[in-house]
Image (cartoon, rainbow, N blue to C red):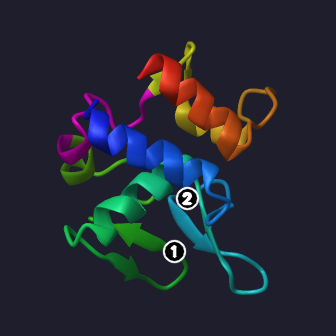
Amino acid sequence: MNKKIKQAWLAALRSGEYEQGQGRLRVAGESGELQYCCLGVLCELHCKAGLGEWKEEVLVTSYHGAYEFLPFDVRAWAELDSDSPTADGRSLVGWNDGDAGADQRSFTEIAALIEVHL
């Protein structure tokens, strides 16, 4: 992974600026606030770098045509080899969403996993 982008991603996940959500890269919460999965935060950094934009659709928001996993443009920019990177034997989406009966992890905990494994 690109070291500069990794550091920015870690800082963003630890910043408290992003509310954590599940199931999609970005979604509006019940009160209208934006919620992100950990991969959605990376997409938001890509957007803030002026490299893309979110597209509001009827019930979901997409980024470069992706809803749940990293689009190719973001993967290439961050120098990741997968649309669903793994850390400590589990996908980041799995850590974020708490799938397969496992506990969900906070953005701070996910940042620690990314720091060690990516």
Q: Nearer the viewer, residue 8 or 86?
A: 8
- Above or below — where is 105 with respect to 21? above
Residue 78 lies in the magenta stretch: yes
- Residue 48, position in %: x, y? 32, 70
Instruction: Write the start and end of the magenta stretch as one range.
Output: 76-85
- Residue 52, position in %: x, y? 23, 70
Q: Earlier in the sequence, mark 2 or mark 1?
A: 2
Secondary structure type for disc 1: loop
Residue 88 lies in the magenta stretch: no
- Above or below — where is 34 with respect to 110? below
88 relative to 5 in the view: left or right: right
- Above or below — where is 35 with respect to 21? below
Q: Toward which corner of the image does residue 97 lie, by quadrant?
A: top right
Q: Which mark is residue 21?
A: none
Secondary structure type for disc 2: loop
- Above or below — where is 10 with respect to 102? below
- Residue 50, position in %: x, y? 21, 72
- The answer to the question of whether label 2 and label 1 lie on touching residues, with beta carbons closer than 8 A, is yes
Residue identified by numbered label 2 = 24
Q: Is residue 69 visible?
A: no
64 relative to 6 in the view: left or right: left
Question: What's the residue at 56%, 39% (across, down)?
Answer: 93
Question: What's the residue at 40%, 49% (across, down)?
Answer: 8
Q: Nearer the viewer, residue 65 or 80?
A: 80
- Residue 102, position in %: x, y? 79, 26
Instruction: Identify the image quadrant of the N terminus.
Output: top left
Residue identified by numbered label 1 = 60
Question: What's the residue at 57%, 14% (across, down)?
Answer: 88
Question: How many numbered dots are placed on residues in this image?
Answer: 2
